[in-house]
Image (cartoon, helix red, strand yellow):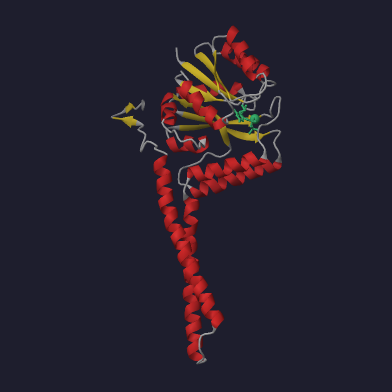
């Protein structure tokens, strides 16, 4: 029997856990051709989250948990989940029931049809502010324009990943993690499933705008080194301005047969030296970008098939 691991990062979720467990239990009891493992990653919760999880484990051996020594953040909780998952596929889910467990059978169906990464795309988002929706939309746009790897829109972490994706993700050990970009980076056969995102069942969101901005910056800087190129591109208009102004000053001096004036010389010098500085920053940026990419130590490639057989990438 195939095993499915549901990974649930949880941080101060004592209020949602009872609802979550009830819904998951119902789901697991309705599907009996698969074995389930529910893997909680307790991300240093300060409330009774871990006590509750331990309670569930006492009476239900399908529950497992990893208990962090402190709060490491959701991204880290997710990779820990991947490290400890035993299933033939994993499903990421939030603890607050914003991702409806009832969608899981559909995810599994597509997995059985041969898809490696079945991700749930939000059709609608209830209980979220207009501003949050707008900023998240703009963020996707910016991120996509900066990179040539395709990014899935309106997609959170709710998804099913085949074992080979899990193995691939386990190889990406960078400490500044951005799962969204990693799911895109690993590739493999992807399938989109639409769903309505529910409001949080209980408790409060762990996010605030500062965290979101941090996440956005982390996302961009860990996805691409293109911001480092800004400098390289900026030196072009500076040198252009220098050239144009230089020609203008010379011609004017010849035509009016007066000497070049002090302020003109100063403008020329400023343009010249700032151009050189920006260029040098750009060069440093280029090398920095290369060092940055090398330090990630990612595998150079991931194989889908070899001679017609699926590569498991173990
Ligand atoms: N979470 C976590 N560590 C954190 C923050 C959040 O493991 O430091 C978990 C949280 O328990 C939940 C999921 O990540 O299961 C999503 O968090 P939340 O619902 O607060 O975010 P939102 O859905 O509002 O974006
Ligand atoms: Mg939530």
Can I make out residue 256 in this image?
yes
The number of numbered badges drawn on the structure is 0
Position of 262 relative to 165 (above/below):
below
* Residue at (45, 58) in percent of width and height: 282
Residue 246: x %, y % from top left: 48, 78
Residue 46: x %, y % from top left: 66, 24
Residue 15: x %, y % from top left: 70, 21
Can I make out residue 193 in this image?
no
Residue 18: x %, y % from top left: 67, 16
Q: Which quadrant: the C terminus?
A: top left
Front-most of residues 181 and 195: 181
Q: Which quadrant: the N terminus?
A: top left
Q: Name the side, left or right, on which 200 lies relative to 142.
A: right
Front-most of residues 198 and 167: 167
Q: Name the side, left or right, on which 190 lies relative to 104.
A: left
Q: Quadrant of ligand 1?
A: top right
* Location of residue 53 (image quadrant): top right
* Residue at (59, 28) in percent of width and height: 71
């Amino acid at each position: 029997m195939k095993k499915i691991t549901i990974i649930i990062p949880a941080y101060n979720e004592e209020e949602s856990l009872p609802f979550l467990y009830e819904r998951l239990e119902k789901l697991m009891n309705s599907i009996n051709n698969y074995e389930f493992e529910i893997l909680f990653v307790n991300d240093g919760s300060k409330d009774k989250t871990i006590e509750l999880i331990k309670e569930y484990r006492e009476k239900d051996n399908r529950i497992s948990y990893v208990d962090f020594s402190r709060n490491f953040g959701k991204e880290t909780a997710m990779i820990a989940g991947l490290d400890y998952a035993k299933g033939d596929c994993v499903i990421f889910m939030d603890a607050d029931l914003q991702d409806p467990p009832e969608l899981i059978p559909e995810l599994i169906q597509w997995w059985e049809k041969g898809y490696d990464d079945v991700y749930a795309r939000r059709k609608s988002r209830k209980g979220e502010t207009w501003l949050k929706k707008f900023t998240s939309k703009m963020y996707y746009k910016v991120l996509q324009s900066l990179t040539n790897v395709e990014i899935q829109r309106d997609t959170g972490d709710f998804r099913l990943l085949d074992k080979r994706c899990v193995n691939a993700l386990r190889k990406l050990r960078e400490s500044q993690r951005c799962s969204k970009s990693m799911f895109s980076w690993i590739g493999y056969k992807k399938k989109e499933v639409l769903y309505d995102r529910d409001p949080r069942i209980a408790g409060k969101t762990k996010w605030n705008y500062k965290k979101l901005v941090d996440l956005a910056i982390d996302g961009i800087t860990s996805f691409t080194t293109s911001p480092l190129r800004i400098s390289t591109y900026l030196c072009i208009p500076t040198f252009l301005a220098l050239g144009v102004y230089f020609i203008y000053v010379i011609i004017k001096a010849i035509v009016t047969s007066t000497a070049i004036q002090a302020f003109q010389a100063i403008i020329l010098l400023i343009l010249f030296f700032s151009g050189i500085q920006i260029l040098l920053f750009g060069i440093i940026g280029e090398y920095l970008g290369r060092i940055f990419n090398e330090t990630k130590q990612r595998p150079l490639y991931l194989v889908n098939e070899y001679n017609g057989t699926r590569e498991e990438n173990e």
